[in-house]
């Protein structure tokens, strides 16, 4: 549009200064004699860069896929059994190759299955059991015996200890093993009886069989 100004209408108007928002969506305004032009960023078109280019028009999504247009890009929504950026690959997770409750994801480049294993399993298909008892230090505390199980392990505790890892010391004094009003002091894996005056026998016992009690 020709927009002259001045006494003889010979001076050009700079529409880019008069209309700072003439070009939309990041377009750059260039003044020309009598008008202006917009240089659009990638993905936009139109006189004012207000039209989003339909990238799906030339998209190469696999047959049966649904194309979603974006700004300067597109996204292929794949039908069941297909994967990849263009839905051009068979989805390897359809055959459930990942075992033991693992998660299966498909590599978008080659279509191969990627298995994310739960704790206790490893391998490409998560079908191999981890022997926690042979990894290094004993996971069971206080001399407990480690027994490997599928996907986990168990601890067989020494007398006087309990817990999943034998981490808890059993308070043997709760069963009142000391007699004649003696005071019971719980110890690691056992107990100690402090007798009342007149009962001079003070007894300390490490538990080898928790059914055995000690008395003054």
Image: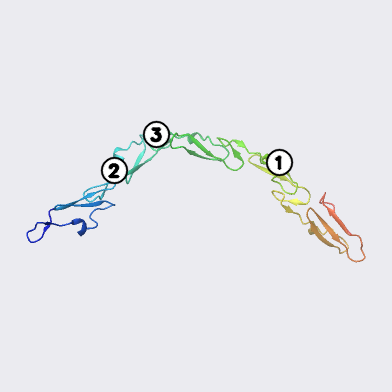
Answer left or right for 94 relative to 196: left
In the rendered view, tell whether residue 78 sits above or below residue 208. Answer: above
Q: Residue at x 29, y 43 (%)?
A: 54
Q: Which mark is residue 147?
A: 1
Q: Is residue 156 above or below residue 112?
A: below
Indicate whether 123 appears above or below 213: above
Where residue 196 appears, as percent x and y from the top left, is 88, 65
Check disc 2 and report its element: helix, strand or loop: loop
Image quadrant of residue 19? bottom left
In the image: residue 204, left or right of residue 55:
right
Question: Which residue is denoted by mark 2 in the rendering?
Answer: 54
Ranked by sequence position, the earlier of labels 1 and 3 is 3
Kindly identify the residue that appears in the image at 85 percent across and 54 percent down. Answer: 205
Q: Secondary structure at mark 1?
A: strand
Report if the CB atoms under discs 2 and 3 are less than 8 Å apart.
no
- The residue beneath circle 3 is 88
């Amino acid at each position: 549009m020709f927009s002259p100004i001045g006494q003889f209408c010979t001076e050009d108007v700079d529409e880019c200064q008069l209309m700072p928002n003439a070009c939309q969506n990041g377009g750059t305004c260039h003044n020309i004699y009598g008008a202006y032009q917009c240089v659009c960023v990638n993905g936009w078109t139109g006189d004012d860069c207000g039209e989003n280019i339909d990238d799906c028009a030339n998209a190469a999504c696999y047959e049966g896929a649904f194309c979603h247009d974006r700004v300067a890009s597109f996204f292929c929504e794949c039908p069941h059994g297909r994967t990849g950026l263009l839905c051009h690959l068979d989805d390897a997770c359809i055959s459930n190759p990942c075992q033991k409750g693992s998660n299966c994801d498909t590599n978008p480049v080659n279509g191969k299955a990627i298995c994310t294993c739960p704790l206790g399993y490893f391998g490409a298909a998560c079908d191999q059991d981890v022997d926690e008892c042979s990894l290094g230090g004993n996971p069971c505390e206080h001399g407990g015996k480690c027994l490997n199980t599928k996907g986990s392990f168990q601890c067989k505790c020494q007398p006087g200890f309990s817990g999943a890892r034998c981490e808890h010391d059993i308070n043997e004094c709760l069963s009142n093993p000391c007699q004649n009003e003696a005071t019971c002091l719980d110890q690691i894996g056992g107990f100690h009886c402090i007798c009342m005056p007149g009962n001079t026998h003070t007894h300390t016992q490490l538990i080898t069989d928790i059914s055995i009690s000690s008395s003054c």
